[in-house]
C-alpha cells in the first residue's frame, strides 16, 4: 500500500493517521485529504503533505482553500462537495482509504471506496449502521479489503480466526465481548443527568475524541452503533454480541470461543494502534504508542451495562430487530438529537427520547438501495427537527 486518501483528515482519526504515516510509514504517498469546513487545518496539511487533491465538503470553504493554496504557490487541486469526496475515494492512484468522516456524511465516499476495490480502513461506523448489506455487498463484489479502525472492532478482528466470514459457529466462536468504558456518567446519579452540560458529556475519561462521538459515548449510543457494526463486520446477530463495561479501557474487546478460551486485545487507549495495524496489515508496524505497563494498570474491572441508565443500547438492538432502514433512522435521529444537545437546545436525557420517538414514527422500509436509505435518513431528521420546533413553540 502506497497511495493513501484520508477522508476527514483534520479530525481526530485523520490527524492520528498522518502522525503514524509521518513517523512510521515513509513509503506512503498522501494522494488526497478531505475536510468539511476547517480551511485553516486543511491549508496547513496541504503545506506539509502536498497532496494531489484536497476536498472540502462545504463549497464556500473549497473556494477559500483554493484562493489560499494558489496564493501560496501550491499546486494541490481543490474539489468540493460529495462528488469530490467520492472521486478521491475511488481514484486509480489511491490504494487505501482511511474513512474517518464522522456520521452519515461519510457514507457515500466510504461506499465509493468499497465499490472501487480499495483497502477501506473504516473508522466511520455509520456507513455500516445505515447500509450494512449494501456496504458488505460492495466489498464482496469489488474484492475490496475491509479493515475496522474502531478500537473495539479492530481488537475483535485481531482476535478472530481467519475464517470468521463464514459465521461465528463455523469459526468456533461463542460470542463477541464488546468492551465499553461506560463514559463520563457511568456512576453519575440518574437524577443529575437531566442537567449535565455538553462540556461534561464531552469529558471522556480515557479517549480523546470529537464532540459528537464523545456525547455518543456518554449516552452509550456509540456502543449501540458498534453492536450493529459488529454484526455486519463479523457476520453475526446482536444476541451474540455482549457489551462489557470495562472502565480502564485497556482491553479493547474480546472473542469468546466454544472451547472456553477468551482471546483479548490489550493496549493503551490510543487510536494510533488500530490505525497502524490497518496501515501495515497483514504485517505490524510502529505506531508511536507507549507500551502497555501492566504493573501500572494493576487491575481490570468488568461489569454489565445498566440498560436503564443507557437506553440507547436497547434502542440499537431494537432497530436491528426491526431491520430495513430502521438502523439508518436510529442513526439520523441520534445525530440530530446530539447536535441539539450540543447547541443546548435540549437536555441530555432528551437524546434517547427523541430517538425512540423517531423509530416509532418514521416508516421503516427495506434497505434495498442507497436512495431509500438516504430518503429515510432525511425523513428521520425532519421528524426530529419538527419535535425540536414543537419544544420551542
Image (cartoon, rainbow, N blue to C red):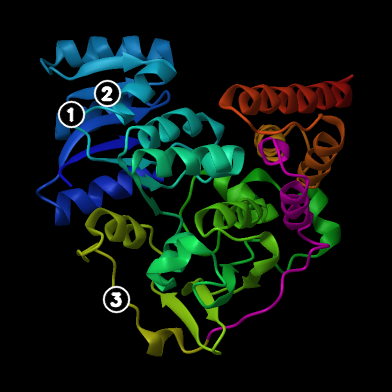
Image x and y of residue 121, in percent: 36, 47
Image x and y of residue 214, in percent: 57, 50
- Asked if the stretch drawn in magenta spans residue 320, the answer is yes
- Asked if the stretch drawn in magenta spans residue 336, the answer is no
Q: Residue visible at 49% across and 62% down?
A: 166
Query: Which is more N-terminal, label 3 or label 2?
Result: 2
Name the image quarter holding the C terminus.
top right
**Disc 2 secondary structure class:** strand
Instruction: For marks 2 and 3, give the CA distance.
Output: 35 Å
Residue at label 1?
A: 51
The relative height of residue 101 versus residue 239 in the rendered view (above or below) is above
Q: Residues within 10 Å of mark 3 (few under 14, many from 20)?
A: few
Q: Nearer the viewer, residue 8 or 148?
A: 148
**Disc 3 secondary structure class:** loop
Q: Residue visible at 55% across and 69% down?
A: 168
In the image, is 139 to the left or to the right of 73? Answer: right
Instruction: For marks 2 and 1, give the CA distance.
Output: 7 Å
Instruction: For marks 1 and 3, give the CA distance.
Output: 32 Å
Q: Which residues are magenta?
A: 300-328
Q: Quadrant of residue 49?
A: top left
Closer mark to the observer between disc 1 and disc 3: 1
Residue at label 3?
A: 291
Q: How many marks?
A: 3
Work out whether residue 100 can be spotted: no
Residue at label 2?
A: 54
In the image, is 290 to the left or to the right of 126? Answer: left
Closer mark to the observer between disc 2 and disc 3: 2
Q: Quadrant of residue 371?
A: top right
Q: Residues within 10 Å of mark 2 (few under 14, many from 20)?
A: many
Amino acid at each position: 500500500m502506497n497511495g493513501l486518501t484520508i477522508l476527514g483528515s483534520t479530525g481526530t482519526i485523520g490527524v492520528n493517521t498522518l502522525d503514524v504515516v509521518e513517523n512510521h510509514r515513509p513509503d506512503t504517498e498522501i494522494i488526497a485529504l478531505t475536510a468539511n469546513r476547517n480551511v485553516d487545518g486543511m491549508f496547513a496539511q496541504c503545506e506539509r503533505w502536498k497532496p494531489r487533491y484536497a476536498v472540502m465538503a462545504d463549497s464556500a470553504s473549497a473556494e477559500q482553500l483554493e484562493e489560499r493554496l494558489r496564493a501560496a504557490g501550491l499546486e494541490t487541486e481543490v474539489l468540493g462537495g460529495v462528488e469530490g469526496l467520492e472521486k478521491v475515494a475511488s481514484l486509480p492512484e489511491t490504494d487505501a482509504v482511511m474513512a474517518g468522516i464522522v456520521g452519515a456524511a461519510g457514507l457515500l465516499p466510504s461506499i465509493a471506496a468499497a465499490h472501487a476495490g480499495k483497502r477501506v480502513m473504516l473508522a466511520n461506523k455509520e456507513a455500516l449502521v445505515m447500509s450494512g448489506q449494501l456496504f458488505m455487498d460492495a466489498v464482496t463484489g469489488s474484492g475490496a479489503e475491509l479493515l475496522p479502525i474502531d478500537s473495539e472492532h479492530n481488537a475483535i478482528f485481531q482476535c478472530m480466526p481467519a475464517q470468521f466470514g463464514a459465521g461465528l459457529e463455523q469459526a468456533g466462536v461463542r460470542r463477541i465481548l464488546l468492551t465499553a468504558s461506560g463514559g463520563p456518567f457511568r456512576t453519575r446519579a440518574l437524577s443529575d443527568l437531566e442537567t449535565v452540560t455538553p462540556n461534561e458529556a464531552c469529558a471522556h475519561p480515557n479517549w480523546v475524541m470529537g464532540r459528537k462521538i464523545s456525547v455518543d459515548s456518554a449516552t452509550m449510543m456509540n456502543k449501540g452503533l458498534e453492536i450493529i457494526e459488529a454484526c455486519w463486520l463479523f457476520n453475526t446477530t446482536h444476541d451474540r454480541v455482549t457489551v462489557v463495561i470495562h472502565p480502564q479501557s485497556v482491553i479493547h474487546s474480546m472473542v469468546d470461543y466454544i472451547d472456553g478460551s477468551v482471546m483479548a486485545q490489550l493496549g493503551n487507549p490510543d487510536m494510533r494502534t488500530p490505525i497502524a495495524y490497518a496501515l501495515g496489515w497483514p504485517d505490524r508496524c510502529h505506531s508511536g504508542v507507549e507500551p502497555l505497563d501492566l504493573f501500572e494498570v494493576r487491575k481490570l474491572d468488568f461489569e454489565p451495562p445498566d440498560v436503564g441508565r443507557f437506553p440507547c443500547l436497547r434502542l440499537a438492538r431494537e432497530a436491528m430487530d426491526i431491520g430495513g432502514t430502521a438502523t439508518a433512522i436510529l442513526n439520523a435521529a441520534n445525530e440530530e438529537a446530539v447536535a441539539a444537545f450540543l447547541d443546548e437546545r435540549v437536555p441530555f436525557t432528551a437524546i434517547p427520547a427523541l430517538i425512540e420517538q423517531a423509530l416509532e414514527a418514521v416508516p421503516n422500509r427495506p434497505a434495498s438501495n442507497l436512495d431509500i436509505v438516504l430518503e429515510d435518513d432525511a425523513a428521520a431528521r425532519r421528524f426530529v427537527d419538527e419535535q425540536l420546533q414543537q419544544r420551542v413553540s
